[in-house]
Amino acid sequence: MASEQRTLKYAGYYSSEEGTADLFMTQVGPRTPGGEYLRRFWQPVALVSELSDLPLRARILGEDLVAFRDGSGQVGVLHLNCCHRGTSLEFGRIEKRGIRCCYHGRVFDIDGTILEVLGDPNEERIKSRMSQGAYPTHVFAGLVFVYMGPPDKKPPFPVFDHFDLPGVRLALPLRLPFACNWVQVKENALDPAHTAVLHAWEDRFADQFGVFPEFEFSEAPGGAFYLAVRRVGDNIWIRSTSVILPNVHIISGVLQNGKIPTPASRPYMSFFTAPVDDTHCISFAVPHVGDDESLERRMAFGWVGTGQTDERPYHERQRVPGDYDAQVGQGPIEKHSKENLSYHDRGVVMFRRMLKRGIEAVQRGEDPPDIYREGSAPIPSMGTDRVVPCSMFEGDLDDPAVLREIGLKTAQAYLEEPPMKHLKSTVYR
Ligand code: FES
Ligand SMILES: [Fe+2]
């Protein structure tokens, strides 16, 4: 579209071309640039509670898999189709050790080793010459994670600073499927402008969410975060959401209203987003619940009601749309070539830049720069609310430039002393 056509009235004809997606960062399959990058990190694949006496079919990074816990308690994640003649192991039988294929009875251990070949005189030769595709697993926070990258590049499972906080427990995770590419779900976490519009339409959130804040964005160890700075009566409320690359984000309480001073509020929910394929993902949401907070109250807020799924009637979603509707509404893979980014999209631009940087590093044969390594400090979460009395600041607190300056200084303070330290050492709320 030529620049002079952009400002025409009734310019539909000139903007009717389809546009193109950025496949470099959105493709997730094997041997694609984005897929190889994602394979260098531990990925969530299922809820632990979904593992039963039956195998669980799962799909992630464009690969069909089967997950199971065998009779000895070990968790396995294997390629779905049996390496003999390809039937699906979702119809297999879980054994004391491993899983038995339903078709001709081969048994596979959790690492893919063939344990048994029925009635074949060449059993030992078969066992020594092939295996079923398998991935290492790790169980954390009620989720099963897999590492699907090159075996010699496997990183340790990361340590996060916002788990295992005193007075905060983890509730059972939720599964939130999205019919769109994973990138647009993560971009949402660095797009604070939407909370002042989309979520202000929902009457469940405090009115203060509807005050359009000033924003700052910052890179952080392992990822990035935003700060949304608002004046609420006699306080300055600084809300931040943290993204840990590539696909984890942490939000603070959705019941927050900025009225009670606090150096740091506890995390509310951590989202581990599994890229299923190019046009689907699943956010596994882990609730962090305070000992002084009832799960009933949390649930009364209604997670579905906050628009994280497509489960509501269509007309309700139209009247009060939520995150699901806005993100899936961008299309299965958003067409970046048709966007017109502006001032508030700095976090989205930052996320894409970091993602591209990581993908390119892997293409050069390096580790992703943001990967957690053996002996690294815990990855800090910046997903918190800081509420400070106005009397602690100088200047005109109704001046946007002063609020942005507060955001900048808070970002620096978080980088020097991550906010979760307050939750370890002081009274939290
Ligand atoms: S297809 Fe699985 S054992 Fe034959
Ligand atoms: Fe949102």
Image (tube, helix red, strand yellow):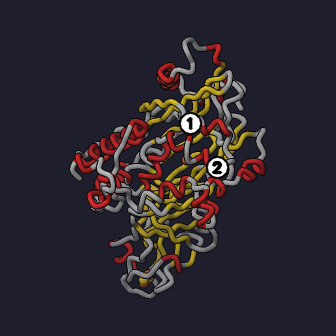
Image vertical order of residue 279 relative to residue 303, above or below: below
Residue at 42% across, 46% down: 246
> Element at badge 1?
loop
Q: Disc 2, ligand 2: is the CB inside 8 Å? A: no
* Front-most of residues 140 and 387: 387
The mark that comes first in sequence, 1 or 2, is 2
Instruction: List x then y, in percent, for residue 297.
Output: 77, 48
* Front-most of residues 8 and 389: 8
Residue at 47% across, 42% down: 191
Instruction: List x then y, in percent, for residue 186.
Output: 46, 48
Residue at 32% across, 59% down: 12
State whether residue 314 appears in this view: yes
> Element at badge 2?
loop
- C-alpha distance separating marks 1 and 2: 21 Å
- Label of residue 202 in the image: 2
Label 1 belongs to which residue? 383
Residue at 60% across, 74% down: 54
State whether residue 150 appears in this view: no
- The mark tally for this picture is 2
Image vertical order of residue 400 relative to residue 368, above or below: above
- Label of residue 120 in the image: none
Name the kind of residue labelled 2 in the image. Glu
* Front-most of residues 136 and 16: 16
Instruction: List x then y, in percent, for residue 193.
Output: 50, 40
Image vertical order of residue 277 relative to residue 44, above or below: below
The C terminus sits in image quarter: top right
Q: Residue furthest top?
A: 394
